[in-house]
Amino acid sequence: MPDKLKKSARKTVQAFINILPIVFGMLLLTSLVVKLFPAQLSTGLFGQNSFLDALLGATLGGVAAGHPLVSYVLGGELLTSGVSLFAVTALIVSWVTVGMVQLPAEALLLGKRFAIYRNLMCYLFAIAIAFLTVYTLQMIG
Amino acid sequence: MKNKPQKNTKKGRCGWLFLAIVLLIYGVTALFDSELTLKAMTSFIHLLDKVLPVLLIVFILIFIVNLLLEPALVKKYLGSRSGIMGWLTAIVGGVLSTGPIYPWYALLKDLREKGMKTSLAAVFLYSRAIKLPLLPMLVHYFGITYTMVLVIYLIVFSIISGLVIEQIDNVHTKMDKP
């Protein structure tokens, strides 16, 4: 048991050392971007209509690669700067379910058909979940 | 065995390289607009103040998951012909699985070769969207109600993803037959 504890502690510390610069970097970058383009973010790229917002959010999340924590930080800050919850939810969901970067590895190990269909489906699901989540929250009040 | 730490070091270096690039961007921005950089730094410190306590909780949860879960355990309960238990195990296994996706692809490949249903692989991969140790961060940014609603939909859609993949698999198996 002490060995297992030691191993887990070492693994956790290593994971955290890997995560920390990414979180710090992402927080720094988000702070700068939000200060640079505060209005453009909410009125430019996003904010045309809910469906386009979700589509754009899912696309950004799908091509992005990185720790899920980054998507929460980025999503949270985008929401604060006025980007819709449709876009942010689609971004968060597709960030962790769609993997354009991992697609070659997934295709190689689990089959090309499986990988392509699964990622395409996850992309559409991210948009669906964005709408369902926002509407459910509106219903709950 | 020797490759693993090297891989981790490489990954760790990428994070630090990313931070260095961001700091470089700050440096260049400061040359042109020091006021904006100062505002961004103030915003960063404010953000950090909010995020650090949550990071501490995340650290503790990652430690607990690392202590309790091993890929071998997931493998044991995700065998073939597992019925509803298999679906449940795929969801729970996906939720509890941590770390990079690549070792899990390898595990799923191994399980599929041993007779695991394709649908369960899809369910497992989709459930990975729920990151238990990171939930405090999600709650911090979006609130408890949002987090609960999102997690429920992710579980529901993980099952749907399994069912859809199963249907696609069936159609292609029929088409492939002479």
Image (cartoon, rainbow, N blue to C red):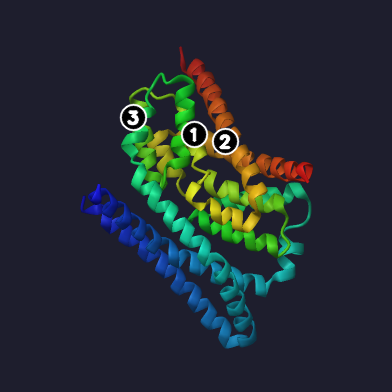
Find disc 3 in the rendering and name its residue: B76
Q: CA distance from mark 3 to mark 2?
A: 22 Å
Label 2: how many Cα within 10 Å (few below 14, some 14–19, many 20+): many
Q: Report the residue that reaches farthest toward the left.
A: B2
The front one of B163 and A134 is A134
Q: CA distance from mark 1 to mark 3?
A: 14 Å
At x 55% / y 56%, what residue is drawn?
B137
Asked whether the residues under the numbered discs 3 and 2 touch, taking CB atoms below 8 Å apart as contact, a structural biologist would say: no
Task: Give the label on residue B155, or none.
Answer: 2
Image check: B90 left or right of A137? left
Asked if marks 3 and 2 fall on the same chain, the answer is yes
Residue for point 65% across, 70% down: A34
Task: Return the x and y of residue B45 as percentages of the image width and height.
Answer: 56, 75
Q: Which mark is residue B32?
A: none
Residue type at mark 3: give it. Answer: Lys
- Which chain does tag 1 point to? B
Q: Secondary structure at mark 3?
A: helix
Chain for numbered disc 2: B
Kind of residue at badge 1: Ile
> Can you give x and y, in whole percent of width and height, for residue B79 in the image?
37, 25
Mark-to-mark CA distance, 1 and 2: 7 Å
Q: Is residue B99 visible from the viewing direction of this image? A: no
Q: Is residue B114 above or below residue B93?
A: above
**Label disc, if present, on residue B91 of the rendered structure:** 1
- Residue found at x 54% / y 19%: B171
